[in-house]
Amino acid sequence: MFIYLSKKGKVIYNDAKLKGLAAPSNLSMNQTLEGHSGAVQVVTWNEQYQKLTTSDQNGLIIVWMLYKGSWYEEMINNRNKSVVRSMSWNADGLKICIVYEDGAVIVGSVDGNRIWGKELKGTTLAHVAWSPDSKILLFGMANGEIHIYDNQGNFIMKMSMTCLNSMTGALSIAGIHWYLGAEGYLEPDCPCLAVCFTNGHCQVMRHESDDHPVIIETGMWHVASIQWNHCGSVLAIAGSLRTNGAEKDTNVVHFYTPFGEHLRTLKVPGKQMTAVSWEGGGLRIGLAVDSYIYFANIRPDYKWGYCSNTVVYAYTRPDRLEYSVVFWDTKNNEKFVKYVKSLMSVTTCGDFCILATKADDSPQEDTEVEAVTAKYALVLCNSIGTPQDSKYIDIDPLFITMTKTHTIAASKEAFYVWQYRVAKKLTALEINQVAKTRKEGRERVYHIDDSPSGTSDGALNFAKAFTATRDPICCITATDRMLVVGRESGTLQRYSLPNISLLQKYSLMTRPYQLSLNCNSSRLAIIDITGVLTFLDMETRAMDAEGALTAGDPSKFERKDVWDMKWANDNPDLFSMMEKTRMYVFRNLDPEEPIQTSGFICHFEDLEIKSVLLDEIMRDPDVPNKDYLMNFEIRSLRDSRALIEKVGIEDASQRLLAEAALQKLDLKTAEQAFVRCKDYQGIEFVKRLGNLQNEAMKQAEVAAYFSRFEEAERMYLDMDRRDLAISLRIKLGDWFRVLQLLKTGSGDCDDALLEQAYNAIGDYFADRQKWLNAVQYYQQGRNQERLAECYYMQEDYDGLERLANSLQENHKLLPDIGRMFVTVGMCEQAVSAFLKSNQPKAAVDACVHLNQWNKAVELAKNHSMREIGPLLSKYASHLLEKKKILEAVELYRKAHHFLDAAKLMFKIAEEEAKKRTRPLRVKKLYVLAALLVENFHTQIKNSQQNKSKGKKSEATSALAGLLEEDETSSDSRILDDAWRGAEAYHFFLLAQRQLYDGNVDAAMRTALHLRDYEDIIPAVEIYSLLAICSSANCAFGTCSRAFIKLESLETLTSDQRQLYEDLALEIFTKHSPRDTRQSQRDSLTEGRIPSYGRWRSCEVIVTPDGKLPTCIVTGRVISEYQFWMCTVCKHYALEQEITQHNFCPLCHSAVG
């Protein structure tokens, strides 16, 4: 199994993917599920019914269902007593068990019905799990205990925790996961119940009462989560690893088999990992780290092989205890199925395959005697699954390799060599080797620490195979004449075949995981435990300092994230490899362009690669599809086919001749061949080669001509022509290599070329929207224009501002930066950029666009601009067209166009009054309009004072201000009676308030004032209120006059008028239409009092229309000599009344 991080991102991925691409990384969030008001703490999935169940910190449970491509809430439940700690669906998805922290347990059905509930008193629950048969429930407690209950909630027993035998005190459970057997089991009675504690101790059990569980010591100091994959073959344990001397903990995921064998460890960046989850097909794993979700692709170790056009693969089924081994003849599209118990591995070579199994405990009568005590069996089968030969062995065949004549099986301590009987289709040399080996014995066993000499060593004695070793075997590979065994320390031991003789040992820096020899056994490919591919030369290729021959010099070649490779069967320098989701073909360690695929390489011969999409096959293994078998041609074959199709066989042969002549620098032959095929560019190239005097230079040019660019570069550098190597890479657009060459070369490099390289790499990252990387290179390349774009796209506005500040005045980039700031609403920064580029009009436009009118006016004044008036009017008209009157008012107000704002405000108040809106709201609107008029008066007065500059008296300035108002204003009514609307609704509300308070006489007096405001408040409302107030005050004379006025209104319908007449008749048949006491409206008191402070003293005050002023607190006519006047609205109030208020009742400004 191989694992690599693919990307980090957000939650759900869509279904679009490339054919043959396992676990594609095109992730996109397709919906946000909104419904929880607190942090989501528990999430579980019902695979059978495709439902998602979630619970939050408030105890709210939501069941989500997918309907027509969107997720909806199907059911909601909230117990409102405790928090849900765990939820689990049973195997068939019909029941869910929910456990609460306070000990409550609820089991419900998939349709939302409650099946049963139980209160476990005195316990704090943390986890729950169903058994595969849904008969058992496991409850994990907060103190680390696990209690076993039946499916009706009856207690059975406590689970024995063998992994905690040496532990004391309460421990916390990290996770309980019981694999439900949906995809079958690896073998009968396979461990499937995993329990792991936060301290890293874990046990895997076969059933709930297993007395001999598999114990796993993870070595983690904190475990966050565990989970089985879809088929129960791999257990993932996620947590933190604390290393001595390390500054911080490392997030890791350990992967184990059900039998506790450690497979791999994946390191994950970030601070804290909190959860792990497998994808449905087991090809990807999701990891919750901090605020990210990391996705790691999994390349499983399938039990499979390829022999004689037949793909052999094995899988488990839930309805059988055995493995189903399928022999799929891809040529005839036929399949043969063989059922094998306890299958361990499938190994193929040539026309045959080896099935390694655990031996049956009860062998048949015709079984050889050796099978009675042997624990394992090796079965040789042909391409349709028919057994050809078999052997029973005692050593555990963990690693198996095959040649045309031999099978080698290795345990951790020893390896077993078996020369199988089938000798079909062998060459004469191979037959001689077989005959010789038969004489010496067909089976031999060797301990890994032994040094066989190839004579009589290796007799079939399994006893020595169980001697422990400090350096176990971890991988093997073989060809017809060589066997290589890898050990965990990194040691490689090379043996001869067929006579086993230890020839040489090699040392690697890492632990090998997979070995492969090329067709002539001259080079060994090594994939280590971290997925790094390297090579080791097995033949003598160099000389040491003393002139002695050396062997095994490792190549400088290295590739990361490699999970499979295959040598060509007919070319020792040709191989293909799988790197993540790409297939590369290499010739002499030079790669071709990659192919996007996730297929497993079956066969590589005759320049063609055959690959099988095992991931797709395993989704429905019973019906393999020929579409899952893919053939790829390497570039040389594709080029040859294209050449023949394009120019024909004859021209193609001339081109091939020309290429071969160029390889040998036979320029005359190459030129003649190019002439015959009319290749003018080839002729020019040959002539250019002829002008070169250096043979090495010619070789480098030829290598570049044939697209062997790495080789050409190497030749240029060997000739100390770094400039030519750089020029080559520039032509190829490989700016990363250009930068590397510029930095690593001796001497000073060209600064201009260095900046060009930095900018080209910045363009590379910018094209891929990796703005942070692009910024780093643009900074070094001093490309301010592209740097500004990257800051903008990255939303790094601080960086953009720093860049603008660093630019010189009138720099051509400043206007563009200013426009960038405008698009994101950063007015101050935009204005600064525009002003620095000497574009004040653009700065004003930016302020207008961002509604910063104060700033716009200030800028217009400072720079003596007159365009602000038309812009203001234009924008206000735009707002009015869109019915955004309040926005227009605010626009005018901010721009200090108070009169225009007041006009709009009066318009709004009048429209609201016509809509019969609440009177208080209408009053507020009128007050705001009047306050804007007062601001206009103040503005005019201040402007006149500024103009006079102290040369005129205050009275003269005031007079000039009034004259200017008359000149500038065409609507004198708004200026003269600004407070009239506010007064009307103020007295209208005051009268009703007094009436409800029982002060009916004051209410009537206040209502009498409303007769002067019929142009603002509808007359029917005024006289209806007056009639009510006067009737309540027993002033039936006034009431009678109010009814007369109502009955005479032309706005009433005949039905309404009749209702008023009937009501008047009813009232005045009982009461005489006379006032019981004299109205105080006309009674006035005259006199004088001294003047002091804010209180006014005068003779009787008369308003401009000849009436006495009215107290805005009580509605009474002011006849006293001492009164109070508001400094804002200029309205009056009785002294004894206003002292009880902190704010003016009309305009709500502060009193005093």
Image (cartoon, grey):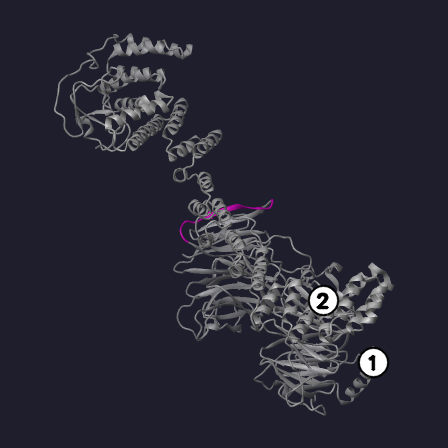
Secondary element at tag 2: loop
Disc on res. 427: 1
Answer left or right for 736 relative to 77: right
Q: Is residue 72 magenta?
A: yes
Q: Is residue 116 above or below residue 1128?
A: below
Q: Position of residue 541 (x, y in %)?
A: 69, 83
Residue 124 occupies quadrant: bottom left
Query: What span is in magenta?
Result: 68-82
Q: Position of residue 111 (x, y in %)?
A: 55, 48
Q: CA distance from mark 2 to mark 1?
A: 39 Å
Q: Is residue 351 magenta?
A: no
Q: Position of residue 887 (x, y in %)?
A: 43, 33
Please report the residue visible at 63 percent of the width from the left and 76 percent of the height from the top.
556
Nearest the eye: 560 or 517: 560
In the rendered structure, which disc, 2 or 1, sits on the residue that comes first in sequence?
1
Nearest the eye: 278 or 831: 831
Q: Is residue 84 above or below residue 1013?
A: below
Secondary element at tag 1: loop
Nearest the eye: 46 or 254: 254
Disc 1: CA contacts within 10 A as few (<14), some (14-19) or many (>=20) = few
Q: Is residue 329 visible?
A: no
Residue linked to disc 2 = 707
